[in-house]
Image: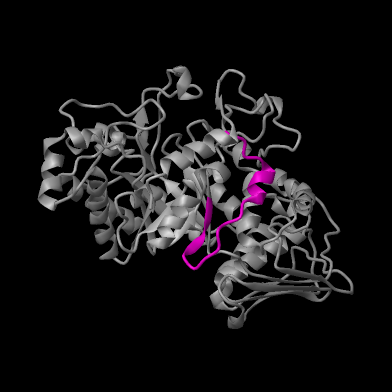
Amino acid sequence: MTLPRPARLTTEPGDPFVPSAGTPITAPPSLGKAAAWLRGVLMPVLPPGSSAGAIAFSHDPGLGPEAYRLAVRAEGVRIEAGDAAGAFYGAQTLRQLLPPAAFRSGSIGETGWAVAPVTIEDRPRYGWRGCLIDVARHYLPKPDLLRYVDLLAAHKLNVLHLHLTDDQGWRMEVKGYPKLTEIGSWRTESPLGSRQHGVFDGRPHGGFYTQDDLREIVAYAADRFVTVVPEIELPGHSQAAIAAYPELGNLDTPLDVATRWGISPNVLNVEDTTLDFYRAVLDQVMEIFPSEYVCVGGDECPKDQWRDSPAAQRRMRELGLRDEDELQSWFVGRFADHLAARGRRLLGWDEILEGGAPPGATVACWRGQNAVSAAIRAGHDVVICPFTELYLDFRQSDHPGEPVPIGSVISLRDVYAFEPVPGEHVLGAQANLWTEHIDSPRALDYMAFPRLSAFAEVVWSPAGGDFDDFRERLHHHERRLAALGVEYRKETGPEPWQTRPDVRGWPRERAETEAEVAAWTRTIR
């Protein structure tokens, strides 16, 4: 009943292994992090007593990165791993072989735990198994974000793409630029429901992470083999920064932090001082986040202000650029160079292809197969995160009680049917949780799970999974989610308290969203 589905599982004859709070857990120093984590989660919940057997970790370099072999016998458990990450994933699988009470924070007095003899050999299908959480539209307090790191790790997901800045909020403390959080981290109100209705809640919303908060999040994630990839949006989706420092923009009039969803027309200017400002920001980002990849956005950047800006037009003439798409490519390229000089790689949304993506850039392809194909043809690595399949803020069914229903339906079955395009440039895939309409941790749980569980199986397990088999295992897995306190969506639909009858959405049909994606990418070659 494990999830994600392992590559190979063989039941074995013999008596079960019976663990207790006295069960020794041993590991060589290289695998000690996994052993320490397993002790931390199991010792508070295991039944009291001594144990004749042990849980032992060992290193087998022949298994490869993130791979493990788990053998359960009456005399004990052996977890062999290709590296420290593989040991951790073996430990996660062992936890799933125990009763759901193993996922609680303290003992509920359950006894008689036993694990049937089994041999599991497992490894991931893709190296990038990610989830984006948008903390810019709605701030997620640090304890809730740490909880999500644990939930990702429990599903063997290994990338948390943290969307830190947008028009509606700036969430990272930056030394030397205090107005980014004094002004940019909060807005006066938010839309109540889809922007088409023009209704607002009248409530200020804000919050930010100090640099020490972010260091803590990064370290906590690293202990669970999750890499935090930070995103600082530019040149579009930058109104919160411009509100804090108007000299970054193209207008003579001051702006407020955006209170509407959608694409703001207010974008960064292309002056040297603005480039220097964001280089300084990215230097602090790199000091906090050791990730190889740093995302700079590059998406949904309206060019009207550049067309009207004498300074932007002068810059284009000086550089011999044909149009504003090439100007954006030049602008993004300055940061690709800055990151590369410091041993990092730029990650950008697939709009960076439109004027030519910088050499060495990795492309997060959200606008369908056209974008994926164009990026691969140009020699770029890609992370696949399609709008119509993996945007988990979209409604989950046609049920009238779905909270704030937007977009076309992306059901549990739809997510499980997602198939990443194989190829040498495909690093993997990620599911995106945009939070315009997800305003609390409880709402985030409902939108994420169990669809994120389905996604995790797609990117970890071998191709060719059967949905009915997955759903049967999911029924057991939901007991684990419940033990963890996850307020997931039930197969029967939302509970009454998960509905939002006070808020109107904007439901659409799949044909509409697919046509929209096709129109967006028509000019990508």
Outermost residue on the right side: it is: 14
Q: Residue at (36%, 40%) from the top-left corner? A: 300
Evaluate whether residue 114 shows in this view: yes
Q: Tell me if 492 is positioned left or right of 390 in this view.
A: right
Q: Is residue 409 magenta?
A: yes
Q: Which residues are magenta?
A: 408-430
Above or below residue 342? Residue 323 is: above
Is 481 colored magenta in this rendering?
no
Position of residue 107 relative to residue 55, above or below, is: above
* Location of residue 153 in the rendering, given as x and y in whole percent from the top left corner: 59, 56
Q: Which sits in the foreground, 253 or 177? A: 253
Q: Where is residue 314, by image quadrant?
A: top left
Q: Is residue 313 left or right of residue 156?
A: left
Where's residue 219, x and y in %? 46, 58
Q: Residue at x 78, y 64 (%)?
A: 20
Question: Can you give x and y, in whole percent of width and height, for residue 192 in the image?
Answer: 49, 21
State the residue at coordinates (58%, 70%). 66
The answer, for residue 155, to whether it is visible in the render is no
Query: Taking 288 as reference, is 467 left or right?
Result: right
Count of marks, rendered view: 0
Residue, x 36% and y 38% (percent of image)? 166
**In the figure, is residue 130 to the left or right of 307?**
right
Indicate the quadrant containing the N terminus: top left, top right, bottom left or bottom right: bottom right
Q: Is residue 202 above or below residue 96?
A: above
Nearer the observer, 14 or 500? 500
Q: Position of residue 524 (x, y in %)?
A: 38, 49
